[in-house]
Amino acid sequence: MPKRHGAQTVLFSNPVGITAAASIVGPKEGEGPLAARFDRIIQDPMFGTESWEKAESEFVKTAAEMAAEKARLSMDNLDYIIAGDLLNQSTGSIFGLRETMRPYLGIFGACSAMGEGMSIGGMLIDGGFASNVLCLASSHFCSAEKQFRFPLEFGSQRPPTSTWTVTGAAGVVLNNAASGQAITGCTTGKMIDMGVTDAHNMGAAMAGAAADTIVTHLNDTARKPDYYDLIITGDLGYVGKELLLELTKKQGHNIAANHKDCGIEIFDKDTQDTHSGGSGCACSGVVFASHFLEKMKSGELNKILFIPTGALMSPTTVQQGESIPSIAHAVIIENIQKG
Amino acid sequence: MNMSKKEYGDMVKKASPNSKIVANCIKAFAVGGTICTFGQGLYALCGALGASRDMQGMLVAISLIFLAVLVTGLGKYDDLVKFAGAGAGVPITGFANAVAAPAIEFKKEGYIMGVGAKMFLIAGPVIVYGTLSSMIVGLIYYFVR
Amino acid sequence: MDYIKAFIIGGAICILGQILIDKTKLTSARILVAFVVLGVFLGGIGLYQPLVDFAGAGASVPLPGFGNLLARGVMEEVDRMGFIGILTGGLRASAAGIMAAVLFSFVAALVFEPKAK
């Protein structure tokens, strides 16, 4: 049976198991509605280091160790580590993983990192090139503000469309012997630019990419939205969700009934002042690794389409007036019978 | 999908909530007014201590800048701006905040390329365009006075 | 009475800034620049000083007041020094404010650590 289906989708010959997942977050996420779901909540946003960048790397390092431990693997058993973050030259991932001494694939897909990592990891395993792959995604509110916006102490008002970068890291271990939760395929997104130039409205910029990937996925696989218990986007937030539902509806797929967004789930917008919701590579990563994966383990969910979304801009392109290209990578995750 | 950027822009505008402009303006008025009234009190104080008019102006500016930098260092000035917006951003204290914030944030990159180079990251343009426009005013004044 | 005038005029200038923030999506850095430049030109044509005379700190503490100071400084310097005053006047008038910001911010960088939000 061919693995490629339609324009952008691959379906694996053998499901790729999700052996373990670890989530570690900062204090604000630890006050949110998903607090009880996370593996670890670190109260010190500096995580015992002396800079935000080092702190983010510490989150990555800890998530990697926790994920490997939960999978009962030593680092030496990992054939590949795939990691992505938001900082220049992948600072968070590289400096968190430089001592692992394992084959490393650094990726950049902005906040879609976890989707990109799990897609590549899944293909590596299904292709027979690896047995164990660790996928990581991280972000840190303070390092992101410092790089993309203003120094933290500088006063500015965040517009209601803005999102709050999640502090944390998630690690997902993929394995060739599937049982329980498994990746059965993925739809790799293409870059979509809807002409949005407002860096304070990333939900609007990314909604187009999310809609494109979802519609392409459904067409490629000839599935209906209700094939999935949930269609879960990464960090569109309230503004992006509204636009996504409208865009997909216009293309003949109504996903309103079973759509969730990790950026909406992670914070309580009324008490946490997070405006449109959470964002950042860690947002989809930690919400999937804790909340949704647990729901699959309990059997509450059996089939999900997980679609981390990324806004592919830099401070330079924003200053040069460029619009924001965006991307969304869909990963199919299903409960499969043991055996 | 067939949708022009203009069409999508209209959709985005509809989906994006607006800032609560009336409430924001009331808060800006209250906090901005309070900072200026406090400045007025400092003028009176300096005057009572016998400072000349020009000296009063300088002392008030220096005092307000000092206080704003202190509050910035304590990590509270951004909270004030979050609440009051332009009410805390437009007074000279907002300028002081714009200088102190990057100085503190970028100390991790060292005192030369961090603090020294980044101190005027936000406020630099204010100095550049303020002084340049003062030169235009000076030039015109030189010929028309 | 001076205090009421300072409050109302100072507050009103801030409202103007707030409307710019909420309506134009200008970044705060751009608004700071716009206000100072506005103050310089209003000061240059002699329109800002009457507001300062009327409202005191209400007009001198907001950033257009800083611009007005630059304009007044450059004109006084041109009177005193002639042509070269065009070059020296602005910075001379604003030196106290700029140096206070540099000094205090440097000390703040020595003393304080960045804080998370």
Image: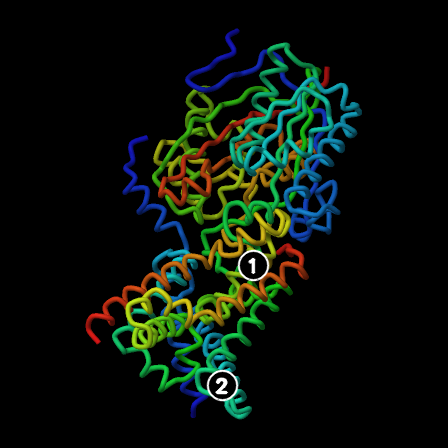
Q: Nearer the viewer, residue C115 or A293?
A: C115
Q: Does A132 sit above or below residue A156?
A: above
* Residue A257 placement (x, y as % from top left): 49, 39
Spatial CA distance of label 1 from label 2 is 27 Å
Q: Residue at 43%, 45% (x, y): give it.
A: A242
* Residue B90 placement (x, y as % from top left): 44, 68
Q: How many marks?
A: 2
Q: Nearer the viewer, residue A53 or B103?
A: B103
* Labels 1 and 2 within one chain: yes
* Residue C94 placement (x, y as % from top left): 43, 70
Residue denoted by label 1 = B101
Residue denoted by label 2 = B43
Determine the residue located farthest toward the left in the rendered image: B144
Q: Answer yes or no: is residue B103 visible.
A: yes
Q: Residue at 59%, 50% (x, y): give it.
A: B112
Mark 2 Cα-neighbour bin, 10 Å: few <14, some 14–19, many ≥20: many
Mark 1 Cα-neighbour bin, 10 Å: few <14, some 14–19, many ≥20: many
